[in-house]
Image: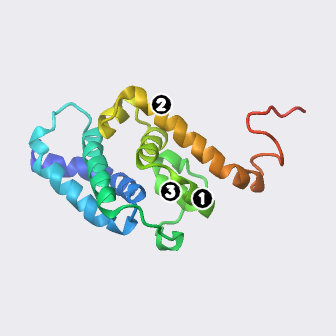
Amino acid sequence: MDSIEFIEHLDQYRDEFFGFVRRNLYKPEDAEDVFASTVLTAFENKGTFKVGTNFRAWVYKIIVNKCFVANRENRRQAVSLEQIEFDQTVDQNAGFVTDDPDKFLALCGDEIFKAFEKLKTVERMCFMLFTMHNYSYKEIGEIVEIPTASIGTHLARGRSKLRQSLKHYARQQGFLKPYMKEGAKDEK
């Protein structure tokens, strides 16, 4: 892959990659540095990219490694939700959950951000790659460098933690009936 092809591929996914970096760092203010480091590493290693394979997955593997390193160096520190900025307006009618997760997350309440931040890094990454970016278990395993069989476990744990964290919020918002047990069928 030459430099021009690399830039064309990168431009196609730039916002998606940056959003993923920002959402997976304990300190979102480091996102630009980690993203720049990711791009530099990918560019320097573009010769190792096999033409015909998935460029997105190849870059995500680099991103995941960079996020793990940054998080290890910066050990988890609380970030107030007011520090997270969203500079785009959301088209309410668009199917943007998978097309633009940042726009979707901008609509979410603080409770959802807090619940999401409580997930372990690997759970959050597996959840995002599967749910928001539509990667298969096999692709996620290659990106995050964990066995494919473990992906389901991390997804289940992440979903369970989110479910527990958001149960009260779901009742307040009318998604669950008051005192309705999770998994109970609504009898009409």
- The label on residue 117 is 3
The front one of 7 and 107 is: 107
At numbered mark 3, what does the secondary structure look like: helix, strand or loop? helix
* Residue at the farthest right position: 188
The nearer-to-camera label among 3 and 1 is 3
Residue 71: percent from left, percent from top: 34, 57
The front one of 154 and 10 is: 154
Amino acid at the residue labelled 2: Gly
The front one of 31 and 54 is: 31
* Residue 109 visible in image: no
Residue at position x 58%, y 45% in the image: 161
Q: Mark 3 vs mark 1: which is more N-terminal?
A: 1
Amino acid at the residue labelled 3: Glu
At numbered mark 1, what does the secondary structure look like: helix, strand or loop? loop
How many neighbours does mark 2 have within 10 angstroms: few (below 14), some (14-19), or many (20 or more)?
Answer: some
How many neighbours does mark 1 have within 10 angstroms: few (below 14), some (14-19), or many (20 or more)?
Answer: few
How many neighbours does mark 3 have within 10 angstroms: few (below 14), some (14-19), or many (20 or more)?
Answer: some
Amino acid at the residue labelled 1: Cys
Tell me the CA gap for discs 1 and 2. 25 Å
- Is label 1 in contact with label 2 (beta carbons under 8 Å)? no
Task: Kindly indicate the quadrant of the structure image that contains residue 35.
Answer: bottom left
The front one of 86 and 79 is: 79
Residue 175: percent from left, percent from top: 74, 48
Residue at position x 55%, y 47% in the image: 95
User: Looking at the figure, which quarter contains the C terminus?
Assistant: top right
Picture layout, residue 172 above or below residue 154: below
Tell me the CA gap for discs 2 and 3. 20 Å
What residue would you read off at disc 1? 108
The nearer-to-camera label among 1 and 2 is 2
At numbered mark 2, what does the secondary structure look like: helix, strand or loop? helix
What residue would you read off at disc 2? 152
Residue at position x 63%, y 51% in the image: 165
